[in-house]
Amino acid sequence: MTHDSHSERHGGFSHAGVADSHMGPARLSDKVYGDIVERILQGEYDEGHRLPSEARLAEMNQVSRPVVRQALSRLREDGVVRSQRGAGSYVMRRPDRAMLDFAPLDSLADMQRCFEFRAALEGESARAATHYASSSSLKDIEKALQRLEACIQGGELGVDADFGFHLAVAYATNNRFFSDTLLSLKTQINFGQNLARNLGLRRPGLHLPEVQDEHVRIFEAIRAGDAELACQRMREHIGNSRRRVFEG
């Protein structure tokens, strides 16, 4: 597969960057991110192999090296590549090609940005819930957990139940701005949850029970009134969800 045909199929970069000259560095890094992910999926960059240098990646994509560094930073956070000072970046994992059945490549970077934002927002939501959750709010979170467990047992996707758990935690803060923000992002959040859970159904004995255990541990920390632990567990859960998208 030539780079020209690869770029043509996915809207790629113009030869001199003219078509993308209106794009900011963040959007350009998203395109580099998608380009590298696809090349890994295609086997052009195999597991354990070294990626081209930053300079070469910048030349291939007609962008600056800082843009390439930003894309590589996100791929490291996703657990797809690792970087070693002076030795370059290496492919750690080839993502499951099935994820392309549920999400186009150009949507992955935005989805990962949403995970980043959620980790910050919902970590604080869990922290606040430990201080302000009423007995009724705690029961609502527990009911949300029960709905999720029923989905697992029934082999259901459970996207709405998953969102319901996170929303129940937000409502427990007694601060409508947490819940209002989640509701305003429901489409984007559901997109990530849908992808992660669809991939999880391919490994039903591992993925979904692991996610459910993380939910339970968040609830236990909130119920115990341990603000720091609740925040930590929520942030870890969302970070794990982000990485699970790329598990091969």
Image: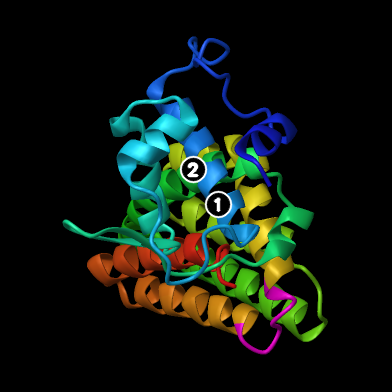
> Does residue 236 show up?
yes
| Along the viewing direction, whichever of 82 and 203 lies nearer the viewer | 82
Q: Which residue is mark 1?
A: 37
Above or below 221: residue 98: above
Question: Vertically, is 68 above or below 126?
Answer: above
Residue at the (48%, 37%) spot, across then down: 32
Residue beneath the point at 59% across and 73% down: 248
Residue position marked by numbered label 2 in the rendering: 33
The image quadrant of residue 195 is bottom right
SS category of the residue bearing label 1: helix
CA separation, marks 2 and 1? 6 Å
Q: Quadrant of the rendered structure where residue 24 is?
A: top left
Q: Secondary structure at mark 2?
A: helix
- Picture quadrant where residue 3 is located: top right
Q: Are marks 2 and 1 in contact (CB under 8 Å)?
A: yes
The scheme the figure's colours follow is rainbow
Nearer the observer, 132 or 38? 38
Between residues 73 and 199, which one lies in front from this camera angle? Answer: 73
